[in-house]
Amino acid sequence: MSRFPAAIKTLHARLTHTNSDVSEDKSQETDPLGLTTVYDPAPRNAIVDIIFIHGLGGSSRKTWSNSSRPRSFWPQDWLPVEQGFEDVRVHSFGYRADWGKKWQQESILNIHDFAESLIGGVRNHPSIRRDDTRIILVGHSMGGCVAKEAYIIARQHPSYKDLARRIYGIFFLGTPHHGSNLAGILESILTVAWGKKPFVTDLKSGSSALALIRDRFRHVAADLELWTFYETLPTALGPITRMVVDKDSAILGFDKERIEAMNADHRHVCKFTTREDSNYKMVLNALHTAVDEIKDRLLESTLSQLDTADSTAIEKDLRLQSLLGVSDTLGEDLILQSELKIPDSCEWLTKMPCFVSWKEGDASNIFWLSGRPATGKSILSSHVIDHLKTLPVYCSYFFFKHSMANKSTLSDCFRSLALQMATQDNLVREKLIQVEHEGVAWDKIDDAVIWRKLFVDRIFKLPLDKQHCWVIDGLDECGNFSSLFSKKLLTKLPRKHELRVFVTSRNLDTIERGFSSLGPQVTTHILSDSDTLEDIRLFLATRLRELDRLETEDDLEAMCNKILEKSSGSFLWARLVLQEFENAWTEEAMETILKEVPEELCDLYSKMVQSIEMDKNKTSLAKTILTWVVLARRPLGLDELRCAIKLDLNQTLQNMRRAIPSLCGQLVYVDPTDKAHIIHETAREFLLDQSMCLELTVYKECGHTNIANILTRFLSGDCLKALQMKSQRSVKMKGFTKSTSAMPLDSSLLDYASTFFSEHIYRCSSGDDVLMEELCTFLNTNVLSWIEHVAKGGDISLITRAAMNLRGYLGRRAECVLPTDLSVSIVDGWVTDLIRVAAKFQSQLLTSPRSIHRLIPPLCPSESMISRTFSKDLRSATFVVKGLPAGTWDDCLSRLDFQNGQATAVCHGDGFFAVGLSNGKIFLYSAESLQLHLTITHPERVKFLQFSQDDEFVISCGAKSMVLWRPTTGIQLYKFLLQSPPLGAIFLGLDEILCAFQYAFLNASDTILLAVGYRKHPVLIWNTLEEQVLGQCIVDANNGIDDMVFNPNPDIIALIVSCNDGRLCVFDYLTMQLMLTMRNVYAQSVACSPDGHNLVTGSSHGKIQLFNFDHDYDGNIILTPIYHINGICDSVRGVAFSFNGLRFFDIHSQQCCVWEPTSPVRKNNELESTSDAATPRVTSVGVLNGPDELEITSLLEASRDGQYVIAGNRRGDVCLFSTANGAEVGTLYQHGRGASVIAVTLGEERNIVVSANNAAEILVCELAMPLRDIATAFQNGRRPAGRIILNRLFSGAVVRLLINDAADRLLITGHGFDELWELPSGLVYKQIQQPSTAGSATNSCSLDYNPVDFSSTRTAFRHPANPEWFVVITDDVVRVFHWADYKELTSIDGIHLERRMQPLEPRRHRESLRLPKAHSLASLRSITVSYYVGLGFVVELLRASVSAPPQIHVWSAATFDPNLPEASALSIAASGLSAVVSSVRSVIGFIGPSTLVFLDNDLWVCSVELQPKVISKYGNYGGVRSSSPNTNAHRHFFALSEWHDTGGELKCALATVPGVIPHSYSQEIIFAAGHRIIVVKGGFKFSARMAVTKT
């Protein structure tokens, strides 16, 4: 007997049969359970995973299939072929939710169980687990609830956290978020029939399970994209037709939910009839939108990563490209050759056994392929490159092009190969980026130095984990290829298999001998006709088929054979013949061409030229085109060539691509990038052969002269001026109106002209007067605009290169004109100026190219050409600099004075130079900026210093000890005690140090030679590796050797020995023969430049001489003097060259001088013929700064009206300076000799000056009259006497002096004391010993703040708001006192400054970004703190060391109000300042109410407007912050590095301009520069927004 009525049985049966979500046939039982991948886009990488989840009674396939149609399982059959889903992986998830099956009697499973099964399946799926795809869940009916629960589990379970991040969104198709009434009916039926099923109960309307899922999902769904589709048609369920899930239940009601209604019932929201079904398209389009959004976000994420992690590599590559000066045209060279290569050709080479052995590392590491000209060597090179790129190796390549800029020298090749290696290999990239700080001028150093610097010392020492291959094509076209062999560069290649080199060239005798000298290191193959026969045949067959002139294959093969027979293995000859066939349409015409075309290339070129010369109308144009194409320093673009022809012939060519081959035949071709090339290097040689005497012969000297005239005239014209006005269009110019009739200027040739005009001048005729006139016109008019244009391109070396070219030309020109020729002196002056400007203002020009017009000229010497030429503009300029030394450029860049010791040693490394003193102090300076890096201390007098390669180490030696240091950090690594005094030491690599002792003097070359000299004995030459004597150089009457040095250039085999009797001897260290003796040199110290071109000597008589190594007519080495310095009062104890050889250093007495004369600046690759080169002139200079010119040692104190400045110097003088002209007015009074003035302050109300020296002596001087009257008295020859009214000596060092506005109180702050004096009586109001407040300060701070402990000093400054008060800060405690009686106005606890402390050390020296709570900055001994007071603001600057980034905190005046009840105060934020805080070097002061003036790391004077806003104590507190990279900071003008003092400090002060409102942008800035002051007027009238870089 049944337990329920028959009607219910009938309903149950029909529901079971017809329910939309149940099985419709028996195949449903076979649908897979769990997660099944139905489509995988492999081998494409999947970006998105879409997972389909069926609902109640459904299954993994049938829910999504229309049973009436085959292949209707749309997630598998339709979706993958839709456009946009190519990289989408599709899955279907199945679970037992078949409520109508009898086997599932009492199910214990619910929605949570299904969700756990789903999320577990997704996590463990191999493809999903291994990828980082984004996941979309698509759920039908109850499947949507399963998807929600699965996401909740993923968010809450720690092991699923990463998976939850990847879930992008959920699609709900008819999901009953609020339950379904049908579920209640089903529950009743199932309870009566087979028992309850929890997953059905969960779906009841008002279900607590669904309510819980909804509530939990709402809290985690904020990051999800949600799509909801609801049914609008009722579903037929047996006798019942009703809505299964109504609209209210299907919609979540979330803000981000995208809702769409479907014209379907519950069954057909997930299964469709065809791909044209509107419901399918609705779901498809939504999925397409989601996939596109994922791809867009992935792209944004990728770009963001490029801006952060990956961009580091890209940024470094760009920096390396700029650093190495490599042009980005390599791809064009490879494309040009690859286009000529026929598919399947050249395979014979890469299959040759010798090539395979080379490639696999089983043979020699160099493979040399040689052959006749035009036999396809470059095409073979391109094939080798393509072949190597398919292998797991790094491939770098270089195509030499004769006479082409950046493609014709070993330097070009080395730098390009190094850059390519770096862009492919991160190890190489990180190693080469270290060169950046060394400031190497690659265009000015020798090829051997570049080879050693980039490869031998760096790349070849790396443990490369992947093989590198070089492909070098056309070595014979390199202008200085012989250096590879003469300097034995290739012998330094690593012997391991890490680097393989493939080289092609013509079979020249010099190259053959060079490679032969390398022995088994080279595998050689000479191209034969048989090697390339099949390649040429394939080329001919392919091109003849393209011509389509021959009808049968037999005819084509016959023609191929005829051409091959005459080609003699020349690809070029075959190519030119086929080009002739383009105009032949008959077999007879082709035969005629073959008969008439000469077999020799030279004869073929001659025939081509004669055919062009036959048409006289074309000859002029053809010759002009050929001249430009043959002599151009790089391939010209068609627009450039059109402009050049217009300037040359005043004719405008149209349709250049067709005109060039029509005019020049086959001699010139246009590549796909629209650049014109000569057909082959042999054609260039033919056209330049003057013996041919053809009308189209290109006469090199005449051609270069004509081109130089045209380019120089072009640069003197309106094109550069127009660009200058365009860049300054924001500046209004009175009287300027635009001409309506002016034709637009063609600037196509501007880049080429700006880059290469001097190259053509260098190669032109020295007797052409017109060119000299054009050059002078350019230099006197547009040279500044040219400099600006070059600077915008980012390569300042072009300016120096132009100067070197002009110098070379000028040397020849001087022999053609009278000595009084004015044009020679003009150009000579500009040569010096261009070299100086490029060296001195390089960083400023790159930062602001426009600075060349207004900022740089006022900073140039008054006698320089730039100043004299543009003096008219300078007189009307608003930016004026006063106090600069008169005269011309000072060859001495910097004079470093040392007060407490004699300079005893100097040495230069790659990025640093070091000076050692008699007291053991060693000062390390940056080689580029000359700024002090750090100071270390040797335990005794320093005898000598020596850097290792790459500045990894530096050793300091004294009489009893030698210490090994790390120069970057100043850390002492080892200390060696010595048994006897050392006389020399050198590094042998990084592992060994070689020393010489007692009476020997030691010096080593870059190879393995060592020279040791003894008094009264010959100089012995040792082989250090074999430890044997090679020979001896005999010095006659050797009474002692002062110094000696090997020339490091292997082409100059010379050992220079300086004898103490004044002789300078030069020996050949291979033959041991004496080659040269110079007398009366008295070189106490000698040094060779790294490239071996120059020698500098310093004599015991105070004379420095610079020589150039040269050869006489017999080939013997001679020393040609080119520069000398007279007037040094003391003996020169040591000399050293900088790495690039452009600077040298000398030490004498207590000073080190850094010299940079223009004489050593030379062109590496001189003219092919130098017979007409002029003998270099000897430049003689005196020492400009005498011993009486004493450095300013105190800070500057400006008068209230800004007309005068007071400062103290090293001798103890307190001097008065005028800001009108920067001149010293006179000395007001003096401290005792031997002590430097360290602080001065001025009390104008009482005409009082107070000063302190480094002996802790305080002097108070009462002036006889005001400063203005004193200045007048000095001008009239009188010296007004000042009266010392107070003189006191303290036991501790005086730190600062502070005087009040009334000048009746003086606060003296020192180490361990504060004193307040009454002036002028000197009455001491109160003496406070320095308290120890570290413990109380620490206890008083909140947990979120770190106390600042400055226990060594107390900092005092005037109160920012009340002139009757002053402020003293100890640690982080502020105390306010009254000037009148030193009464403290703050409470006993003071006011506590709360600041968030960021790490003060550089990032590389720290482990975390926060200091521990208990950490006190007192432990950082080098920490400095300074305060700057404005109208209502105080700025605090903290710095742990010179190299550490600063911290800046801004405090309002209210912070220092003693009447406020708060016991602590927070720093405030200033918008814009945080964006530039890392660039701040020092703070200068305030202008206006809230504009802070500071000096950035590049010495630019900048300003930033402080716009403070209070920071929540519990929110964003701490230092100055800004949410936006856009800053209101501006850059105005720059200071010069030579104004630094010996300690690297730049002393400067703001001064008020008379008659101008105080605190305005018209204020002047005064700098101390040695013994003088520099006054900058109108500097703030120039402004450019600072660029903010992410740090």
Image (cartoon, grey):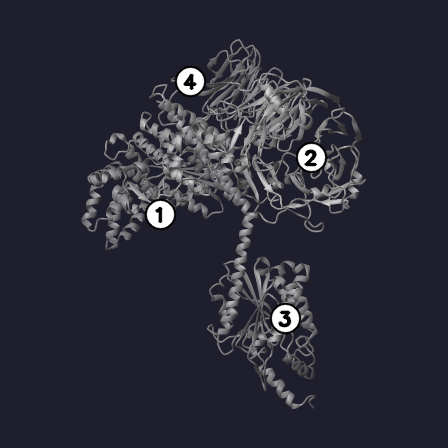
Query: Marks 2 and 3, Cα distance to the nearest angstrom?
Result: 62 Å
Q: Earlier in the sequence, mark 3 or mark 1?
A: 3
The residue labelled by disc 3 is 145
Query: Marks 1 and 2, Cα distance to the nearest angstrom?
Result: 61 Å
Between residues 968 and 860, which one lies in front from this camera angle? 860
Q: In the image, which is nearer the foreground, mark 1 or mark 2? A: 2
The residue labelled by disc 1 is 672
Q: Position of residue 326 (x, y in %)?
A: 45, 38
Between residues 294 and 1032, which one lies in front from this camera angle? 294
Query: Marks 3 and 1, Cα distance to the nearest angstrom?
Result: 60 Å
**Quarter of the figure with the C terminus:** top right
Query: Marks 3 and 4, Cα distance to the nearest angstrom?
Result: 95 Å
Q: Residue at x 52, y 70 (%)?
A: 283
The residue labelled by disc 4 is 1116
Between residues 819 and 1233, which one lies in front from this camera angle? 1233
Q: Earlier in the sequence, mark 2 or mark 3?
A: 3
